[in-house]
């Protein structure tokens, strides 16, 4: 990742017709967890209406509580890739928690028979799952979205990316998503977007911010924008070039992280906000 004399990442990269570098801004708005074909299709249609060609879709969910919805797994991959093909979505960010999931994704992409790309997401809970990191590094087909460990140092998270890069996959985006503290917080996590310029200074990875998992609530003051928008602003001003945001057609019945999901009607506003903030500096 540009440190320790290890394998170097490129300073940004192009994948499936989408550029990930310091100058681009990529909005990965989508479902934290796929729960139905209808949700997938409504989400992708909303993206297409806004001219956004990237999304996030969770099939394999690493839940803290084993009795909560665990994601639909391989069963929902055909919905995701067929709908992505139909709506012209170029890259789907998707978390994998086991190397076997990479094969399942490859198979489903082949079955769908369209040119959709996938960015493999490493979740915060797997930030130091070194065998998973090595497997993801050994496959060269897909770029990687690495989410910083929520309870480890930044240095440890950067070393984790080195595990991916040193196995031969230099296409890594580093994602800040908030960290845990013992101090309590009005948000789900302590927003750590002041680390964006630090990561950019120390490495050559493009940086993503995930305001949904950092803030954890989609609320807004009566006359203002949701906290999530403001966190996006902080991240973009600090130099992030990718944003991962949770949406759901019906947040009140979402099976995972509903309280932090924005509504599809807010997608256009988010896109305009992103363009204005990015254009302002
Ligand atoms: C997610 O993005 O769906 C997710 C679980 O995020 P994190 O790993 O940051 O908690």
Image: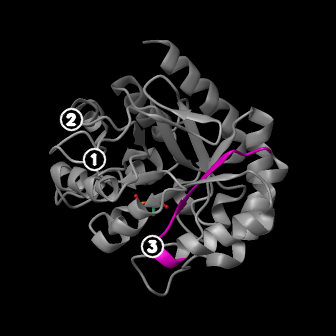
Label 1 vs 3, first from the N-terminus? 1
Q: Name the residue under label 1.
A: 7
Against 82, residue 211 (above or below) is above
Q: Is mark 3 on a helix, strand or loop?
A: loop
At 44% from the left and 75% from the top, the residue drawn is 63
Disc number placed over residue 202 in the picture, else none: 2
State how the image is colored. Answer: one colour
Q: Mark 3 points at which residue?
A: 97
Marker count (numbered): 3
Quadrant hosting ligand 1: bottom left
Residue 224 visible in rendering: yes
Crowding around mark 3 (Cα neighbors within 10 Å: few <14, some 14 to 19, many 20+) is some
Provide residue 279's location: percent of width, then percent of height: 52, 14
In the figure, residue 90 lies in which quadrant? top right
The furthest residue to the top: 280
Q: What element carries label 2?
A: helix
Task: Provide the residue span drawn in magenta.
Answer: 88-100
The furthest residue to the bottom: 67
Question: Dots 1 and 3: beta carbons under 8 Å?
Answer: no
Q: Distance between the residues labelled 2 and 1?
A: 14 Å
Label 3 vs 2, first from the N-terminus? 3
Quarter of the figure that contains the C terminus: top left
Looking at the picture, tell me which residue is in the foreground, 179 or 135.
135
Q: Distance between the residues labelled 1 and 3?
A: 24 Å
Q: Is mark 1 on a helix, strand or loop?
A: loop
Provide residue 64's location: percent of width, then percent of height: 39, 77
């Amino acid at each position: 990742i540009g440190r320790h004399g290890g394998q170097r990442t490129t300073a940004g990269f192009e994948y499936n017709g989408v550029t990930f570098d310091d100058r681009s801004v990529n909005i990965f708005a989508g479902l934290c967890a796929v729960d139905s074909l209808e949700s997938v299709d409504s989400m992708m249609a909303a993206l297409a209406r806004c001219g956004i060609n990237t999304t996030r879709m969770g099939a394999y969910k690493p839940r803290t509580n084993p009795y909560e919805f665990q994601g639909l797994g391989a069963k929902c991959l055909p919905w995701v890739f067929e709908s992505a093909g139909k709506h012209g979505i170029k890259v789907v960010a998707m978390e994998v928690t086991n190397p076997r999931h990479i094969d399942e994704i490859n198979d489903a992409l082949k079955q769908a028979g369209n040119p959709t790309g996938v960015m493999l997401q490493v979740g915060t809970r797997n930030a130091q799952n070194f065998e998973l990191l090595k497997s993801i590094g050994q496959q060269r087909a897909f770029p990687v979205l690495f989410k910083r460990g929520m309870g480890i140092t930044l240095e440890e998270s950067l070393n984790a990316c080195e595990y991916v890069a040193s196995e031969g996959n230099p296409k890594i985006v580093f994602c800040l998503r908030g960290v845990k503290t013992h101090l309590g917080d009005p948000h789900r996590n302590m927003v750590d977007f002041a680390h964006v310029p630090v990561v950019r200074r120390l490495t050559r990875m493009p940086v993503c911010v995930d305001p949904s998992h950092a803030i954890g609530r989609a609320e807004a003051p009566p006359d203002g924008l949701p906290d999530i928008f403001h966190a996006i602003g902080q991240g973009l001003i600090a130099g992030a070039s990718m944003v991962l945001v949770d949406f759901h057609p019906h947040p009140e019945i979402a099976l995972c992280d509903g309280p932090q999901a924005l509504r599809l009607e807010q997608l256009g506003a988010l896109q305009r906000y992103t363009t204005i903030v990015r254009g302002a500096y």
